[in-house]
Image (cartoon, rainbow, N blue to C red):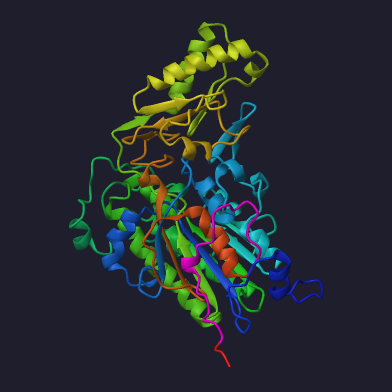
Amino acid sequence: MRRRFQPWMVRLVCAVVWAGVAPVWAADEKPPRLLVLLVVDQLPVRLLEAARPKLSGALARLTGTSAFRAEALYPYASTYTAPGHALIATGAPPSLSGIPANRWYEDDALVACERPEQLRVETLADIVRRGGGLVAALSLKQRSAWMLAGRDPSVVAWYDYPSSQFIGPEWLGRPATLAARKAERWEPLDPSYYATLWPDRQGFETDYFGLGILFPHPAPALLPPKAFLATPGSGALLTDVVLLALDRLALGSDAHPDLLAVSYSNTDYIGHSFSAESWEALDALLRLDRDLERLLARLDQSVGPDRYAVALTSDHGVGSAPRIQIDGAALARRIQAALAALSIPAAVHFSEPCLWLPAALRRAPAQRRQALELALEMARATPGIAAAYGWLEPDGLPDDAPFAELIRRSLVPGRSGDIYLLPAEDALFAAREPPSRATSHGRPYDSDRRVPLLAAGAGIAPGRMPADADMGQLAPTLARLLNLKLPAAASSPVLSEALQEPPPAAGP
């Protein structure tokens, strides 16, 4: 339900003056009423390019000549879901946002990224709320929804697969379309086209979610609940919920810019199981193209095509099928056993991309140094690990080390482990649970860092940016588009090429 205007609410022009931000819009113009921020989890540029000849919906709009198109690189090494969404939301790398990975250890306890309080900096959503706007953040993953939602969202919701319902407002709960989405058998839209790129069955694909390897894939209703996440039906269900929230909140209905942030996680689950070079990943993207067209068509009708802007990107790319899968948990157990043999208290932990030594060793510097040297030696001898750095030590991460600056931006004291592990380009960390994944991400290589950056609508200048953008530029650019204060921790400059500057007023 839409809130009534209160006298204390700051008018947009006052907010701009207070923030000291030069307006993007001319005096007789207004910013978009609604900003739609779309995150397609695990979307490498090469997959979007493979799909382009067959796009006909929203992605066709966003890759067409009326849109702004660029490729962007994440400015850090640990390309995981939580830090990616945090950067999109804040403009800050992990070293500033405080989000180094999806999970980390603190005092020997595993911590999952799942609450906005874990962010150490303000988000675009926080700024929208202070300007009097509404914020709705929705995803299939809890961490994705909360990183985009900020500390005071109007609505935040994510899908809980064990209970088959959305966690959030009661009116979202169990969508009316849930049963139908789960009953859909997954058939390929264009198998003849897919066959020109790759075979349906490839040796690296896995049955990670119980869907099988070959098309057609069975209806998720016949499988364990988690299988639904790795199907296009879960993305379609998320779109159903987004449309419900759009209507319920009347987003984009007044002069205070609102934010609708949606993260499509099904593409990540599909990619991990089948890889980006698969019929499944390509088919899921073509179906997402149609789903997003449903959303844009509703926005055209309810908000107006000239009163909203949409930006689409990804939280990370992904590598190709690896030659080596590194069992980080097994490495931690081997190090723990070696330390125990030396009578050193042993509680070694692993969570991508770090190893944690026993917390008790902080009170025994000599033993800690001995443990660190042994752990580094064992890690560096592990197949698939290109380098291991005791980054907390003086010169533990030399300036001339490969990807040194990207790695530094990934690490958070107190949250990142004692040792940072760098996989080789043909290696990745194995899944936490068997069977292993077809592929993954989280590394500083171009394949994992490079993503599309697309935008269209009110205030967006069409054209293709010839140089790579820095993903840290997105959050401040979107704040400037809305004529709001830029996120405090965003250090990258506004992406001026993406903004439509109105022409100067004609002279007398």
Nearest the viewer among 52 and 166 is 52
Residue 170 included in the magenta stretch of the image: no
| Whether residue 185 is visible | no
Looking at the image, the residue that sits furthest to the right is 7
**19 vs 81: above or below:** below
Name the image quarter holding the C terminus: bottom right
402 vs 49, left or right, is right
Tell me the residue at 61%/79% (across/down).
30
On screen, residue 34 versus residue 194, left or right, reads right
Please say whether residue 413 is visible from this viewpoint.
Answer: yes
How far across and down, in percent of the image, does residue 41 sit? 45, 53
The residue under the point 28% across, 67% down is 54
Report x, y in % for residue 146.
60, 53
Q: Residue 286, percent across and down?
A: 33, 64
For image coordinates 73% across by 67% down, the residue present is 18
Displayed quadrant of residue 334 = top left
Q: Is residue 117 above or below residue 331?
A: below
Q: Nearer the viewer, residue 358 or 97?
A: 97
Residue 219: give x, y in percent of width and height. Answer: 37, 56
Q: Nearer the viewer, residue 213 or 421?
A: 421
Give me the residue at 67% from left, 62% from top: 127
Task: Label the magenta part by its dominant secondary structure.
Answer: loop
Q: Is residue 189 above or below residue 506?
A: above
What segment is highlighted magenta in the picture?
484-505
Classify the position of the N terminus by image quarter.
Answer: bottom right
